[in-house]
């Protein structure tokens, strides 16, 4: 209650904020934690873990006929969506999430807004490249390809230049390639053969 200039108590009408569910202000970065029939669990990036944002997502999802239940945990950034397992309902869930401005990709702990923006842009670009090439290539293929083309160009122009490569760079590449090439779990001997 407020008092007016005459000292009388007056009631101010509550102004309700109208939320438009179809036009989010910024993309919401999330990661799929688990996807089992009838249940989808997402983790929202730290910068979007405000109660209002999580409630907005939960309310919009809960309003959909193909979604049975939505649970959120703001502290962990978790959203659990339970839906009926009829054909196409998972696609409907993903369509609803996309309409809410939710994008999927790797999220990191404590990422800044700038890092989230760059990550969002790269995920979107990767999706567009994959769609343009009908799934044949993506950025994870094109980026190393581009670097290898530059390496071949430098090799042709300047030669090997082994004399200017520091020893620690060669040592690191040696260690790194060994780990990557031999980074498989050794198989246990079979008990059936008596080994």
Image (cartoon, rainbow, N blue to C red):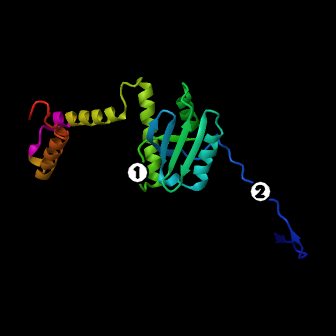
Residue 96 lies in quadrant? top right
Q: Quadrant of the N terminus?
A: bottom right
Q: Residue at x 10, y 30 (%)?
A: 193
Q: Residue at x 44, y 25 (%)?
A: 132
Relative depth, front residue between 101 and 60: 60
Q: Position of residue 43 (x, y in %)?
A: 47, 47
Relative depth, front residue between 50 and 75: 75
Neighbour class for label 1 at 10 Å: few (<14), some, many (≥20)?
few
Give the CA separation, mark 2 to mark 1: 37 Å
Relative depth, front residue between 138 and 93: 93
Residue 145 falls left or right of residue 6? left
Q: Position of residue 128 (x, y in %)?
A: 45, 31
Circle 2 sits on which residue?
15
Q: Helix or strand or loop: what does disc 2 sit on? A: loop
Q: Quadrant of the C terminus?
A: top left
Q: Helix or strand or loop: what does disc 1 sit on? A: loop
Q: Residue at x 43, y 45 (%)?
A: 119
Q: Position of residue 102 (x, y in %)?
A: 53, 41
The overriding secondary structure of the stretch rendered in magenta is helix
Q: Magenta region: which residues? A: 154-162
**Is-magenta flag for residue 95?**
no
Residue 117 falls left or right of residue 163? right
| Figure check: 32 above or below 14 | above
| Figure check: 121 above or below 149 | below
Circle 1 sits on which residue?
108
| Figure check: 99 above or below 163 | above
The tag earlier along the polypeptide, 2 or 1, is 2
């Amino acid at each position: 209650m407020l008092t007016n200039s005459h000292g009388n108590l007056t009631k101010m009408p509550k102004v309700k904020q109208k939320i438009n569910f179809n036009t989010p202000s910024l993309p919401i970065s999330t990661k799929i934690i688990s996807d089992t029939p009838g249940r989808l669990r997402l983790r929202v990036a730290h910068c979007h873990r405000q109660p209002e944002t999580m409630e907005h997502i939960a309310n919009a999802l809960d309003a959909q006929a193909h979604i049975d239940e939505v649970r959120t945990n703001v502290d962990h950034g978790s959203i659990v969506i339970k839906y009926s397992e009829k054909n196409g309902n998972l696609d409907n869930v993903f369509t609803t999430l996309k309409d809410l401005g939710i994008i999927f990709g790797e999220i990191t702990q404590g990422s800044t807004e700038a890092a989230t923006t760059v990550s969002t842009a790269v995920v979107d670009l990767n999706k567009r490249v994959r769609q343009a090439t009908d799934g044949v290539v993506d950025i994870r293929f094109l980026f190393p390809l581009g670097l290898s083309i530059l390496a071949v160009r430098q090799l042709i122009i300047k030669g090997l230049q082994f004399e200017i490569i520091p020893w620690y760079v060669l040592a690191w590449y040696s260690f790194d390639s060994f780990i990557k090439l031999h980074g498989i779990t050794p198989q246990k001997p079979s008990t059936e053969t008596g080994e």
